[in-house]
Amino acid sequence: MKKYILIITLFFTSILQTQSQTTLKFNFTYDNNGNRIHRYLDPTPRKIDPNLNDKPFSDSNSNKTIAADIYPNPTQGILNIDITNLPTGKKFSISIYDTYNKLVYLSESYQANIVLNISDLSCGIYFIKIDSGSSDFKKIIMKE
């Protein structure tokens, strides 16, 4: 019995190590009415790109000179934002997008320290973008 437990433990450990380096892909077959009739695992492993970061937008032309501390993350509704490297008196916008890239919050300000109340948003993952026109800052936030 101990032998089987050891084998199973080693098997799942190897799967977890493999999944941390690759992703699994499921393929589906459908009938003529569009109903899924079969699901199978694609045996071709796909490597996860280690160069991916948490920047949800592709904006390669902007120089990212704005920096910000956003806390607590995850939040239960109140976000504190401390913006640095922002020219004094420069107006900027704060945008929050959901995972469907739908704008759910928009605000403009001149203050470098802001408290946002996002308690009316549902729980989930959001993307926050602070844009001053000449530079921007992007980060993923989670609402509990």
Image (cartoon, grey):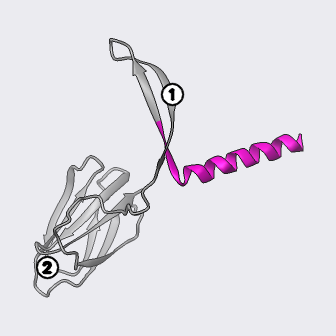
Q: Secondary structure at mark 1?
A: strand
The residue wearing badge 1 is: 40
Relative placement, left or right, of 44 versus 105 is: right
Mark sitting earlier along the chain (2/1): 1
The residue wearing badge 2 is: 110
Amino acid carrying label 1: it is Tyr
Where are the magenta residues, as a range?
A: 1-25
Report if residue 15 lies within the magenta region.
Answer: yes
Camera-side residue of 45 and 60: 45
Camera-side residue of 111 and 117: 111
Report if residue 84 lies within the magenta region.
Answer: no
| Image coords of residue 16 (percent x, y) | 62, 50
| Image coords of residue 29 (percent x, y) | 42, 21
Relative placement, left or right, of 82 versus 63 is: right
The outermost residue toward the bottom is: 88
The outermost residue toward the top is: 32
Residue drawn at (38%, 61%), measured in percent from left and top?
52
The outermost residue toward the front is: 44
Q: Answer few, some or many: residues within 10 Å of disc 1's Cα (few below 14, many 20 plus, some between 14 and 19).
A: few
Q: Would you identify the image quadrant in which residue 36 lies?
A: top left
Amino acid carrying label 2: it is Tyr
